[in-house]
Image (cartoon, helix red, strand yellow):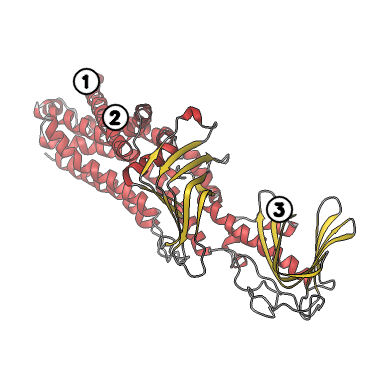
Amino acid sequence: MLSRTLFKYIFKDLFRIFMMTSGALAGIMSFGGLLRPLTREGLDAGQVGKMLTYFTPAMTTYSFPIAALFATAVVYGRLSADNELTAARSSGISLFSMTVAGPALVLGLVVAIVSLLFLCFIVPASTLKVEKVVYSNLAKFVAGRIERNHEISFADQTIFAQDAIMPPPQTLPPGQQQVVLISPTIVTVDRPRKDDRSFRVPKDFYTASRAILYIDPLPNGEEVQLTLRLDGGFKFPRQYEGAVELGVQETEYGPFTIASPIKEDVKFMDVWRLKELYANVADSQKLRRLISLFVFNGQRQAFFKEISDQLNGPTHRAIFNFENNDRYVLSWEGQGPAMSAGAELIAPIPQFAPSHPAGTTRPVADPNDAGKRPVVFRHEQNGRVVGFWRAAELHLYAKPNAATSQVDVTVDLRDVAFETSQGMAVRERFPQPFTVPMSEEAKAIGGRDLSFYESPQAAGLGDQKTLVREKTSVINSIIAESNGRASFAISCLILVMVGCALGMMFKSGNFLTAFAVSFVPALLSITLIIAGQRTASRIPIHFTGSNNPLDFALALIWCGNLVNLCLAIGLMWKLQRR
């Protein structure tokens, strides 16, 4: 039985060396973590101070396993080298009570519990604050990238510039950031391969002598709006055939929105947020963006179907009502069903049978001949016709807005005949934009749960394979992060046992020797945990469910602890037999 005096004697040394080691390692790791953002993003003194403050809790926690192993290796190595363990055993105190059931166990339990609490609550919050400090000044972030690399990419745009200048903050509107770009070139790209988003093809090029980049964070906190004002600009396409080339004195490019640089990451979430997200994975930013595309396509198709049913119905009319008895009436007077084409749909809308290829224009014919111009579009106010157009073709474009429950519509008439004060006139095309309320059926599409968008009913509304991959990636990340935090905390307890055994075997209280023998087990455990967390979210492009990497990732996360536990048991058994 270990006396209270001996327990305090050993535990005091263990705790003292543990705290010294943890503090030293946390300081070194904090400066190491600061090195990359300092060299890449060009932080100022204020940002450096904040980042060091926010780095401290995370780096202190990450130093716990090494510090615990190091402390036990030093203390028990000194006890063994000074024959204090031999004296204790000769007094009837077992090696088991000196180590596994003694001060080392208490230290291991305390460190494991504190580590788990830090990883579950404090470290995610401090890590998120570090990320916010880096991207708190996006203008400086952009200017730093331009100064170092002369290039920065945003979604489907890449900006090249010789230099970047930041205007004084006091001259800017509240909340807005600006960067002045010298000799900028903007390259827009297309992604023709839906299954390979990394494959990009240049589309258009913009050049200017000078440009101002306006940065406006949006209220939702998840997006940023960018606008470029070009001075002395010039635009030219990658392919000149059928394209437009022009020079402008001053113009704007954008605005366009990009996702906030602070991306959603499970490492920024405390344990309650992880549990909440796991229960409702559709709340993930990635899945919300994908689902919004499904909703957009579904609501657009629902709108097209409504118009199709009306034009192909008994009245052959679609009516769009507005306030003050104002309305548009779209009619079909031709033989057979009507036809239309959507803005992003190559094939005709279902129930619309094309009588000729979409996108072509019929030859000009007699304006009064309904057979040649079967599409009629009227504008009525208080029952009186104030506008009348007859067209050979109808192209219908719709852009639903789920947030406002409205649809932005454009009726694009081709080969149009209309009446003027000089008589009948013919125009190649006549587009008429307007906004109408969304039908209840279309609204209902936005209220479906995630399972609907994965089902065969949602086929054709979006890329379901990508949706399933992203869902699996989010779930795997949550599971791997939770297991990683638990494994990391438990490693502190296991490594304490390993440190006791290694210290007693090497019989040396020398700090360098203790560090050398403690480095490898700790590195093994931490490396495998990180590798497992990274592996879990790497979902194969051709994901089938059977090739889910989660099981392998969990094996990696716990494998290091299992190896160290076996090592500790084997070494302690060997020491006990001496």
Spatial CA distance of label 1 from label 3 is: 74 Å
Q: Earlier in the sequence, mark 2 or mark 1?
A: 1
Q: Earlier in the sequence, mark 1 or mark 3?
A: 1
Q: Residue at position x 77%, y 76% from top?
A: 373
Pointer 2: what residue? 107
Q: Say if 447 sits above or below 238 in the image.
A: above
Please state which amino acid type lies under the numbered disc 3.
Gln
- Please provide percent x and percent y for residue 469: 47, 59
The residue sitting at the top extreme is 5
Please state which amino acid type lies under the numbered disc 2.
Leu
Q: Is mark 1 on a helix, strand or loop?
A: helix
Picture quarter with the N terminus: top left
Q: Is mark 3 on a helix, strand or loop?
A: strand
Q: Is residue 227 left or right of residue 327?
A: left
Q: Quadrant of residue 502?
A: top left
Q: Nearer the viewer, residue 340 or 514?
A: 340
Q: Quadrant of residue 107?
A: top left
Pointer 3: what residue? 406
Q: Is residue 575 left or right of residue 434?
A: left
- Please provide percent x and percent y for residue 143: 39, 40
Q: Is residue 395 left or right of residue 486?
A: right
- Which numbered disc covers residue 9? 1
Q: How crowded is mark 3: few (under 14 residues within 10 Å), some or many (20 or more)?
A: some
Q: How many badges with numbers are in the image?
A: 3
